[in-house]
Image (cartoon, helix red, strand yellow):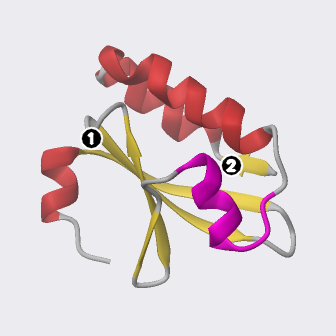
Amino acid sequence: MRASPYKLLRDFAQKHPNTRSALNHWYRLMTGRNFRPIAELREVFSHANRVEGWTVFNIGGNTARLIATIHYDQQIVFIRHVLTHAEYDRWRP
């Protein structure tokens, strides 16, 4: 699966260095496989949830939330937001 834009991950990790390793791990796992339904995705990312059309990933033990749109038919994940847990609590889709 392709993930874009990587720049959001890099920028977030610069602001929050404690998330760098977890974000890189998420990226490697996501781009190293082809997922079809969310059930397959949850085999690797057990805490991935659908929230009003978005897929939300817990990153680094709830340190951050990655919000994405996934097009399974095209094998593309569009990263829309990377937020701290506190920012996510205020986020509205």
Q: Position of residue 25 (x, y in %)?
A: 58, 26
Residue 76 lies left or right of residue 42; in this view the side is right
What is the magenta segment's predominant secondary structure? helix
Q: Position of residue 78 (x, y in %)?
A: 64, 59
Residue under the image location 80 percent in, 49 percent down: 2
Query: Which residues, given as a range, are shown in magenta?
Result: 35-45
Check disc 1 and give the amino acid type.
Answer: Asn
Residue that badge 1 annotates: 62
Verify whether residue 59 appears in magenta.
no
Q: Quadrant of residue 38?
A: bottom right
Identity of the residue furthest to the front in this view:
43
Residue under the image location 30 percent in, 34 percent down: 61
Mark 2 → mark 1, Cα distance in angstroms? 22 Å
From this view, report whether residue 38 is shown above or below residue 86.
below
From this view, report whether residue 79 is shown above or below residue 60.
below
Q: What number of labels is visible?
A: 2
Residue that badge 2 annotates: 4
Q: Position of residue 7 (x, y in %)?
A: 58, 35
Check disc 2 and give the amino acid type.
Answer: Ser
Of the numbered discs 2 and 1, the one sitting upstream in the chain is 2
Q: Secondary structure at mark 1?
A: loop
Identity of the residue furthest to the bottom in this view:
52
Q: Position of residue 11 (x, y in %)?
A: 45, 29
Q: In this orientation, which residue lies closer to the viewer: 92 or 28?
A: 28
Image quadrant containing the C terminus = bottom left
